[in-house]
Image (spheres, rainbow, N blue to C red):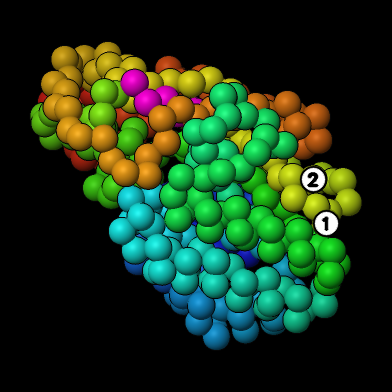
Amino acid sequence: MSRRALVTGGAGFIGSHIADRFLAEGYEVSIVDNLVTGRRENLPAAATFVEADINAPATAELIRDGRFDVVLHHAAQMDVRKSVADPVYDASVNVIGTLRIMEAVRATRRPTRVIFASTGGVLYGDFVTPPNDETFPKDPESPYAIAKLSVELYLAYYARVHGLDTVALRYANVYGPRQNPHGEAGVVAIFCGRILDGQSVTVFGDGQQTRDYVFVGDVARAALAAARRPLPAPGRLDVRGFNIGTGIETSVLTVAKSLGRVAGVEVPVVFAPARPGEQLRSAVRVERAAAVLGWTPGVTMDVGLAETYHWFAKRSGRSAAGGVAA
């Protein structure tokens, strides 16, 4: 009998890549997504799809009846700036929605591993010097990151008190094909869209703020490893938390220049005021993921940016140099 996986947010950028990976490995995959930010075109044909919000009773029923071996929880309010503007809404999705998922898993009384999409990019805040390892103090700058940390504490609670099998993957800044170029999150996708439209890119602050950019295909491999590997006993924060990144800091200006080289154009940059709640530096250490999950990043920044840009160019009908694709 094949193993069964549920991906919440599976019509989204990261979730759809994870669904593809699990299908390729022989899992029966179900997806639940409300399609607010997810796209039908991202849904794998071989997956079973349920259109529902994670706070809806239909999602809890799916989990209770689905006999899943693993739940990969990637449905989220993912915009840091939106969390600053509306922290109540952010918490209603990222905290309350996750608690409903956990309660539904608890009700199944099955040995289901729950893998939560946390954040390594903003969890640790600006009070530590990157690259950050999993045990560094956590003092996040935004409601989005506070919600992610809150959920990790809840995961530890569910493991200790109810015996649930929980894992947190602390993603750095994930980029790659299918990312939304018109949203507020995902600078690589946004820059790709602007460059292909022949427009300038907007950089907030001085552009020297750094991020740890990890390719989405590498993230999907990490999720699969977290689903399959024997792990340390859960129950304390950080014991089952794994940074998923590269350990390399790259500035926003460097990303813009690198994409310009891929596109074969000089990208004009417009500077705008720095945004409240935005972290200045971010990178994560990944030695624990290597030791426990057997995972290391495999795609370099140059290769990943080129693959991402060319995907957007093909999708838009343009060539890499801004002309019409053949």
Quarter residue 317 falls in: top left
Q: Nearer the viewer, residue 305 or 41?
A: 305
Q: Name the residue: 54% across, 83% down.
A: 58
Q: Is residue 307 above or below residue 48?
A: above
Secondary element at tag 1: loop
The location of residue 162, given as percent across then percent down, is: 83, 71
Amino acid type of the residue that numbered disc 2 sits on in the rendered structure: Val
* Quadrant into which the C terminus falls: top left
Name the residue beneath numbered marker 2.
Answer: 239
Name the residue beneath numbered marker 1.
Answer: 235
| Mark 2 → mark 1, Cα distance in angstroms | 7 Å
Q: Left or right: where does residue 228 sit relative to residue 17?
A: right
Our reading of the magenta stretch's main secondary structure is: loop
The location of residue 230, given as percent across then percent down, is: 86, 46
**Do the CB atoms of the residues marked 2 and 1 lie less than 8 Å apart?**
yes
Q: Name the residue: 76% across, 64% down.
A: 157
Badge 1: residue crowd in 10 Å (few <14, some 14–19, many ≥20): many
The location of residue 36, given as percent across then percent down, is: 35, 66
Badge 2: residue crowd in 10 Å (few <14, some 14–19, many ≥20): some
The location of residue 63, given as percent across then percent down, is: 66, 76
* Quadrant into which the N terminus falls: bottom right
Segment colored magenta:
208-212
Residue 294 in view here? no
Q: Left or right: where does residue 325 sit relative to residue 111?
A: left
Q: Is residue 216 above or below residue 105?
A: above
Q: Is residue 143 above or below residue 64?
A: above
Secondary element at tag 2: loop
Q: Nearer the viewer, residue 92 or 219?
A: 92
Residue 254 in view here? yes
